[in-house]
């Protein structure tokens, strides 16, 4: 695999696409319709007051359309704007779209949702309003997944952290690339809390070995590990949607996870292999992913 | 953060709306909408203070060189530290995307 920018474009890199292009790529051709588009100028009322330039869509793209011929809504976070952070407006766009999708289902329209995570979590400049919006996203995912699977995609390169990592954990299925990272706290926060001897945030291979897409797949927290290829990611998302709702949602298996974590001796320094062993035995997840075969 | 307004002579109003770019490091977004006939108005909001003269020079170069050729537009530029070169490319991309859309090439 060559790594020149030109060949990345030629091979159809998904990571290289901006949020709007990602939404377009996932929806069936010609079905994309944007809700609250940039020209409505629904921007953050808080950033400008703090001297921060706003973006016309507040870094969130809401695309309605179809996937695999079925009604769908795709929610994409733009990682390049303020680190993909979620404030009041962007958070409300995602929560509102998920709530509308659940309402569709209650009225017999089987709208599914795909969330493209590219986010450091809450936007610190909007503090509590961002946190409240993320909590609304959490409950909206839990509501919608009663009817349809909610698929999350973490492509990279920002990853998915903070309150939005909880949103990812609530999804019925998660898709990740090698570039992706998933964690509650970002590396610098962990380093600050745990000390550089335990967690060096500048050591990239080390960071990815614990929170990268492949490790999260090996530990069963991610359902499909994919190449950074738009066609591949699209067909994986379609495949997961066709599978329908999982027998048991991952977040409903918290008892299992708590038990596994309780069994771990925290005096032993964790390694990626140890983490895989701790998470490995999971009959429910294995039953859910039977036949998935994506590695 | 600073805001500047500019005005240039132009052709007939643009026939559509276009948005390109992102308010990310070293980049900017451009929102292009139809303007009043013969006039392009530009509002720039930038994260970097003290570069009013550079904006003036770069936009003069873009719009005075081709004043009557480009359609009249209302441009909103939200900048996060783009270099003049990137500004030029994003503005050109916005007008080019507009042209493609008018020619029926929905991009």
Image: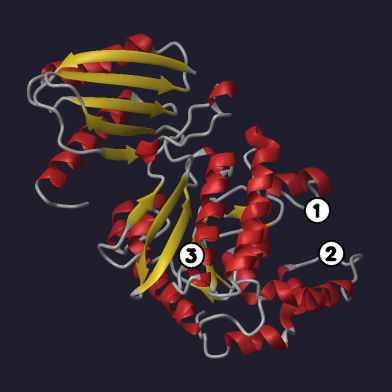
Q: Position of residue A244 (x, y in %)?
A: 51, 81
Chain letter for the residue marked with disc 1 in the picture:
A
> Is residue B4 in view?
yes
CA separation, marks 1 and 2?
9 Å
Q: CA distance from mark 3 to mark 1?
A: 36 Å
Above/below status of B31 relative to A20: above
Q: Which residue is more in the foreground, A283 or A204?
A: A283
A259 relative position to A102: left or right? right
Quadrant for residue A66, please give it. bottom left
Q: Which residue is mark 2?
A: A269
**Residue under the point 61% across and 47% down:** A120
Categorize mark 1 by other alpha carbons within 10 Å: few (<14), some (14-19), many (20+): few
Q: Which residue is identified by label 1? A: A198
Disc 1 + disc 2, Cβ < 8 Å: yes
Q: Nearer the viewer, residue B61 or A70?
A: A70
In the rendered image, residue B43, in percent from the top left (x then y), is placed at: 33, 20
Q: Earlier in the sequence, mark 2 or mark 3?
A: 3
Mark 3 and mark 2 in contact (Cβ < 8 Å)? Answer: no
* Residue A191 image point, x, y percent: 76, 47
Identify the image quadrant of residue B5: top left
Taking B104 as reference, is A147 above or below it?
below
Q: CA distance from mark 2 to mark 3?
A: 36 Å
Which label lies toward us, 3 or 1? 3
On the image, numbered disc 3 is attached to which residue?
A114
Q: Residues within 10 Å of mark 2 (few under 14, many from 20)?
A: few
- Proximity of marks 3 and 1: CB atoms separated by less than 8 Å: no
């Amino acid at each position: 695999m060559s790594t020149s920018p030109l060949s990345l474009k030629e091979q159809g890199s998904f990571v290289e696409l901006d949020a709007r292009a990602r939404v377009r790529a996932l929806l069936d051709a010609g079905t994309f319709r944007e809700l609250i588009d940039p020209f409505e100028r629904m921007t953050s009322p808080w950033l400008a007051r703090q001297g921060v330039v706003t973006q016309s869509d507040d870094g969130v793209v809401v695309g309605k359309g179809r996937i695999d011929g079925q009604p769908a809504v795709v929610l994409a976070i733009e990682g390049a704007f303020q680190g993909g952070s979620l404030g009041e407006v962007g958070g409300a766009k995602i929560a509102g779209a998920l709530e509308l999708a659940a309402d569709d289902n209650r009225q017999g329209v089987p709208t599914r949702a795909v969330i493209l995570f590219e986010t450091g979590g809450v936007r610190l400049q909007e503090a509590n309003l961002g946190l409240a919006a993320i909590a609304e996203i959490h409950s909206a995912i839990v509501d919608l997944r009663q009817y349809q699977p909610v698929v999350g995609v973490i492509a990279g390169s920002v990853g998915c952290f903070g309150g939005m990592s909880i949103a990812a954990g609530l999804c019925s299925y998660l898709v990740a690339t090698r570039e992706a990272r998933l964690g509650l706290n970002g590396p610098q926060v962990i380093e600050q809390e745990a000390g550089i001897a335990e967690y060096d945030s500048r050591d990239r291979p080390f960071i990815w070995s614990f929170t990268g897409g492949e490790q999260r797949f090996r530990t069963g927290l991610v359902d499909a590990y994919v190449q950074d290829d738009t066609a591949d990611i699209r067909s994986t998302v379609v495949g997961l949607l066709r599978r329908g709702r999982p027998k048991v949602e991952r977040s409903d298996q918290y008892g299992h996870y708590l038990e596994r974590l309780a069994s771990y001796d925290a005096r032993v320094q964790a390694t990626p292999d140890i983490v895989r062993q701790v998470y490995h035995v999971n009959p429910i997840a294995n039953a859910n992913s039977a036949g998935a075969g994506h590695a | 953060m600073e805001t500047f307004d500019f005005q240039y002579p132009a052709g007939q109003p643009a026939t559509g709306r276009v948005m390109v770019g992102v308010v990310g490091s070293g980049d900017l977004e451009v929102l292009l909408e139809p303007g009043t006939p013969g006039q392009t108005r530009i509002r720039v909001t930038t994260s970097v203070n003290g570069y009013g003269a550079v904006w003036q020079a770069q936009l003069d170069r873009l719009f005075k060189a081709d004043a009557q050729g480009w359609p009249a537009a209302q441009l909103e530029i939200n900048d996060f530290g783009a270099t003049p070169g990137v500004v030029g490319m994003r503005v050109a991309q916005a007008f080019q995307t507009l042209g493609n859309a008018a020619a029926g090439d929905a991009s």
